[in-house]
Image (tube, rainbow, N blue to C red):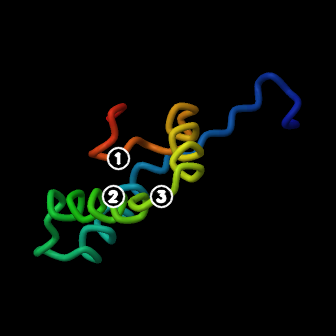
């Protein structure tokens, strides 16, 4: 049987691997991980990163947000 044969069926079930991956991720972040605090920190970092832009930088930033390249920040009118 060849891969070009229409009867050739190749499947891989990654369910067990995905559960193992999730277990390792949760072990890595630890029991004290606060997703809400992490999100707030990301929003604060986004606001800081895109603060103090001059007019040209702001124009480019706005274009990138409008094009969907960047996500709007919490203080953006499009947010």
Q: Which mark is residue 47?
A: 2
Q: Is residue 61 above or below residue 21?
A: above
The answer to whether mark 3 and mark 2 are in CB contact below 8 A is no
Query: The C terminus appears in which quarter of the rendering?
Result: top left
The residue tagged 3 is 53
> Residue visible at 41% across and 62% down?
52
Q: Earlier in the sequence, mark 3 or mark 1?
A: 3
> Residue visible at 28% across and 66% down?
23
Mark 2 lies on a secondary structure that is helix
Could you tell whether 37 is left or right of 56 in the image? left
Residue furthest out toward the front:
55
**3 or 2: mark nearer the eye:** 3
Mark 1 lies on a secondary structure that is loop
Q: Is residue 78 above or below residue 22?
A: above
The answer to whether mark 1 and mark 2 are in CB contact below 8 A is yes
The residue tagged 1 is 73
Spatial CA span between label 1 and label 2? 6 Å
Q: Is residue 13 above or below residue 35?
A: above
Spatial CA span between label 3 and label 1? 14 Å
Residue 57 point in image, percent of width and height: 56, 53
Of 70 and 17, the residue lying toward us: 70
């Amino acid at each position: 049987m060849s891969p070009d044969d229409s009867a050739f069926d190749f499947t891989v079930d990654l369910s067990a691997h995905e559960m193992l991956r999730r277990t390792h991720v949760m072990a890595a972040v630890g029991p004290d991980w606060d997703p809400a605090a992490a999100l707030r920190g990301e929003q604060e970092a986004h606001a800081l990163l895109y603060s103090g832009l001059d007019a040209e930088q702001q124009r480019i930033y706005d274009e990138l947000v409008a094009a969907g390249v960047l996500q709007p920040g919490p203080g953006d009118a499009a947010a």
